[in-house]
Image (cartoon, coloured by chain):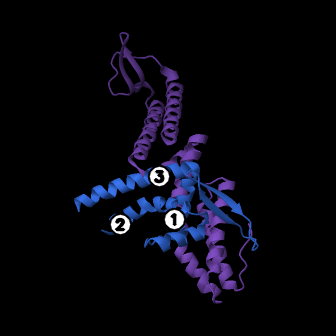
Amino acid sequence: MKNIELTSTTAQRIYKDYLKRVEKCLTILSKVDRQEMLMEINSHIFEGMQRFSDNNETDNLLTVLEKLGTPKEFLKPVIADKKIAQAVRTFNPKDVLQALLLNFKNGIIYSVFALLYLLLFVFVFFIAAKIIFPAKTGLFYLDDKFQAFGFIQNIDGMNDVLRFWFIPFVTLSAIIFYLLITLLLRFTKKK
Amino acid sequence: MHKWTAQVKKGVLSFIVLNILQENEYYGYELIEEVKKNTDIEIAEGTLYPLLNRLKKEELVSSKWVEQESGIPRKYYSLSEKGKINLQEMKEYWVNMSSSIQKLL
């Protein structure tokens, strides 16, 4: 990208600082998208500067940037959108978390998804319980009838059918649950 | 009141942009000037870029980079075929809605 030529060093510093802030906001985008947006903002600043007939470069630049707004504020929708697309493509928990946080205010649906993802912690809790209280955590049956799944106080006469398979089973369930809700998120987004 | 006007502005901005683009193709800065010239909407100019991005994703507008002598290219936006159809529907909806609101006032 070609930078705008500015004569005053103060103007140069302001300009570079602004572009840096834009770039920082766009780090989660792909390189192509980031470059595209950066070029467009750069073009906006350039065109804005061309509208002035006087030579107060620094003042003019500041006016253009002020009207353009704070990058963090006006770029929010782009970032939130792209992040969801990225999250459902990569299945990366970090992307999913970021996407939900960014979209939280954009509708009730994302709050529902946040809750679903929070439910994953139940699985983590089960695994921790199995490690700390191995005897009281499991899939319990009494005379071939299902009694309880998880962590319970009173296990009189019950039989834990999973035993050491409990942790692998819970882990696998968690993974399946995670994949399911992420697929659901992808589906919601596509509509 | 302030919150309401802000919401209305946000809601109609894409409609305004599509209307402006039906006449001509414009690059970002020019488009903002047109928005300002035709309406009294005061917006942080930057908000227009995410909006254009969305319209592009929805295939209502198309864009192309045009090289300039200055070395800093302009990104021109124009209304796509889908955008034209959509805009027509939006206009009809707008007319119907404003006439029903008018009756209420």
In front: mark 2 or mark 3?
Answer: 3
Specify whether A163 is left or right of A32. Answer: left
- Check disc 3 and report its element: helix, strand or loop: helix
- Taking the spot 33% from the left edge, 64% from the top edge, the residue there is B4
Check disc 1 and give the amino acid type.
Answer: Thr
* Chain containing the residue with disc 2: B
Q: Check disc 3 and report the residue beneath it.
A: B88
Residue A42 spot, x, y in % from top left: 66, 70
Q: Are marks 1 and 3 in contact (CB under 8 Å)?
A: no
Residue A43 spot, x, y in % from top left: 66, 70
- Taking the spot 35% from the left edge, 66% from the top edge, the residue there is B5
- In the image, B48 versus B104, the foreground residue is B104
Residue A83 spot, x, y in % from top left: 56, 50
In front: mark 1 or mark 3?
Answer: 3
* Chain A image colour: purple
Q: Check disc 2 and report the residue beneath it.
A: B5
User: Of marks 1 and 3, which one's residue comes earlier in the chain?
Assistant: 1
Check disc 2 and give the amino acid type.
Answer: Thr
User: Of marks 1 and 2, which one's residue comes earlier in the chain?
Assistant: 2
User: Of marks 2 and 3, which one's residue comes earlier in the chain?
Assistant: 2
Q: In this view, does B90 lie above or below B74?
A: above
Mark 1 and mark 3, same subunit? Answer: yes
Q: Check disc 1 and report the residue beneath it.
A: B47
* Chain B image colour: blue
* Chain containing the residue with disc 1: B
User: For the residues marked 1 and 2, what is the alpha-carbon distance in whole angstroms?
Assistant: 16 Å
